[in-house]
Amino acid sequence: MLPWRSLAATAAVKLRPFAPSQVRLGPGPVLDAAEVNRRFLVAQDPDRLLHNFRVNAKLASAAAPLGGWEAPGNELRGHYVGHYLSACALVSATRGDGQLKDRADRMVAVLAECQRAHGNGYLSAFPEELFDRLRADRPVWAPFYTIHKIMAGLLDMHTLAGSAQALEVVRGMARWTARWTQPLGDAAMARVLEREYGGMNEILYDLAAVTGEAEWREVAQRFDHERIFRALAEGRDELKGLHVNTTIPKIIGAARRYELTGEARYRRIAEYFWRQVTERRCYATGGTSNNESWNAGPGVLSTELSGYTQECCVTYNLLKLTRHVLSWTGDPACAEYYERALWNGILGTQHPRDGSKLYYVPLASGYWKLFGAPQADYWCCTGSGSESFAKLGDSIYFHDDAGLTVNLFIASELRWDERGMTWIQDTRFPVEPRTRLTVRTAKPTALQLRIRVPSWVERGGAATLNGKPLDGFAAPGGYFVIDRTWHDGDRVDVALPMGLSLCPMPDDPGLQAILYGPLVLAARMGTAGLGPDTLRAEPTRPRTVPEYKRDGLAMPALTGRAPWVRRADQTSLRFATVGSGAPRELVPLYQVLDERYAVYFRGSGS
Ligand SMILES: [Zn+2]
């Protein structure tokens, strides 16, 4: 099966993802999170979601309008519907969920009806007048951002859920976009691109790839933002001052341009950007941004901790970009980043009670996670979060002609029909630092199995094949390769010892986050002043950064062990401070809910 949404990739690709339908999650916290999200999606009322589309097309709607960013009059209304279609398509592909597929198919039919009523290919929950304002450089929020979400949702319904009607609707939208942009000269278009437009270039390149219709590439290129691309192509970080979630989708578009055309410049743009952001602009969690922007130069993060750090859409988009860079390079650093951001920036950003989503993950001490109210907020991150939790299995496995790469330790089953094999990963990671891979195959099959050995693996990493030790286990930060003929029932057990380490701020090494393996730990700070109302309200002024004495121990190496924390027991992920003062409990950030917490700590004297 061709890789999802990369159907006509022409550029050299080292690793290919599997289609979402080929990977099923197994029991564990990741599947639990996917289930919570599925219930959140099921709880949505499609007629309420479609209300503004019907009203805008002058079709009857008896549904009660939604609130927040989907409220009538909000200039982004309709954006969540695009994410919702993507999420339903993903869930239907990954779980064979007929309920959400049928619902999304019916929604596509209504959207097609709305598009017919407009009569010119236009489809939106807000009037075209917003685009008149955009063209005239008058105040308007981000109309193309919303169009991108709807087009992406429709294209996902086509590629993942087999909807022919969705493809026709998105083609109509692309034709409308071509007509809208065509009269604009380069200067006028450059002005349009200064307004957030999501990934219009990405979706049009995707449409060209899916249909083989080259004309969409030309429309896509109108949305390639040369003002942003120029410095990146020349290896310069001029990101300071940019709105982060406006920028990353443009770069994903550059990645798609490279994949479709082979133009190396666009790979340079995407790859330089990815390395610069993940290596110099990300917190220990793998997230980036503060108040939605990059406010400082590269490597300056200690001044950026607030209640509005790492917008969740940003992590969602960085993970999308990571998959592209990984597929070109096969660089284990990409998988390392993916793991870090997935556990610390995606899992833990929805409430298990009702699936409501976070907007920001606060990283200043004393804040709490502020979840949106279901049916009320519909933030951008409600949308990207609905997608994130619908594709949690999408980056566990990759492949090439020679073999299979295992990048993440998540209980799952990979059905690799092309090779006649099924790989089953059994693991209780991260509670237990090990995983087991078992193959089911009708006939003996030669294959290279590459298992990532993360840089966080401590001494004692090892693997066995059918119970017999294997030599030459890879050094941390690489892949352990087993090249052999596999027989039905062959079993590889991998020990991945996890330890505690410190992740210092690059510009203030005394300010440090504590990690257990890839998991950022958070100190629990109680619920003082928090009630049902405040947990849904804006985070208020933070408390001070907690200070812990380190009992005269030498300053640990910057990436060394955390000598003042120990794991409470081996069956849970609870940790406690040691040394003077009352012990304080730490848990993985992804497990923190409904209480104040701290992620960065300052050792006294540092
Ligand atoms: Zn967002």
Image (spheres, grey):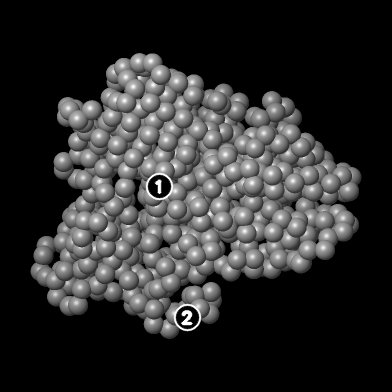
Q: Which residue is mark 1?
A: 27
Residue at the image position 47 percent from the left and 39 percent from the top = 24
Q: Is residue 486 left or right of residue 125?
A: left
Query: Quick check: can you spot residue 40?
Result: yes
| Residue at the disc numbered 2 | 531
Q: Position of residue 231 (x, y in %)?
A: 52, 44
Residue 35 left/right relative to 60? left
The residue lying toward the viewer, choosing from 379 and 128, is 379
Q: Amino acid at mark 1?
A: Pro
Task: Answer yes or no: is residue 185 visible.
Answer: no
Instruction: Please state which amino acid type lies under the numbered disc 2.
Output: Gly
Mark 1 near ligand 1 (CB under 8 Å)? no
Q: For this view, does 188 lie left or right of residue 31?
A: right
User: Which residue occupies 74% across, 61% down?
Assistant: 48
Label 1 sits on a secondary structure element that is loop
Q: Front-most of 534 and 6?
A: 534
Residue 222, given in percent of the width and then of the height, sits at 70, 40
Quote the CA–CA distance across marks 2 and 1.
32 Å
Q: Residues within 10 Å of mark 1 (few under 14, many from 20)?
A: few
The numbered mark at residue 60 is none
Question: Residue 180 in the image: x percent, y percent?
Answer: 81, 44
